[in-house]
Image: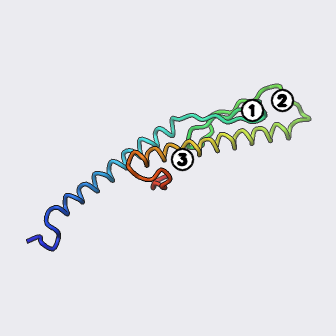
Amino acid sequence: MLKGLGGLGGLGDMSKMMKAAQEMQEKMAELQTRLDDTIVDGESGAGLVRATANAKGVLKSLSIDPSIFSADDKEVVEDLILAAIKDVQSRAQERTKWEMGNLAESMGLPRDMNLPGM
């Protein structure tokens, strides 16, 4: 009858694989939402310029201490702004990597495994 297919047991394994794939997809979707909502902060110039982004690196706000505004310091201010943005984007990448590691471990996978869709 279904001898060559390993009996109905093979269908049960396929069902388990499909269920595991669906669970992974659901967890990835939840993680994407969490990353959208997770806020990280970066700064430069000992806090004179602060940037806020979500864990995906999307810049949400930028705060500049008014004490640094001077026509003579234009280039310094621009450098501080860029440094704060780079800092917050780096922290966002670190947070995403950490969250992805947690997700991988929760599914019994190696922490440093690259999951699809990220």
Which residue occupies 70% across, 32% down? Answer: 50
Q: Position of residue 97 (x, y in %)?
A: 54, 47
Secondary structure beneath disc 3? helix
First in sequence: mark 2 or mark 1? 1
Going by the image, does 63 lie left or right of 59?
Answer: right
Q: Residues within 10 Å of mark 3 (few under 14, many from 20)?
A: some
Q: Position of residue 91 (x, y in %)?
A: 62, 41
First in sequence: mark 1 or mark 3? 1
Q: CA distance from mark 1 to mark 3?
A: 25 Å
Residue that label 2 marks: 68
Q: Tag 2: residue type?
A: Ile
Which residue occupies 89% across, 33% down? Answer: 71
Write down the quadrant of residue 26 in the picture.
top left
Q: CA distance from mark 3 to mark 2?
A: 34 Å
Q: Tag 3: residue type?
A: Lys
Mark 1 vs mark 3: in front: 3
Going by the image, does 56 lie left or right of 23?
Answer: right
Q: Residues within 10 Å of mark 2 (few under 14, many from 20)?
A: some
Disc number for residue 112: none
Q: Are marks 2 and 1 in contact (CB under 8 Å)?
A: yes
Residue that label 3 marks: 97
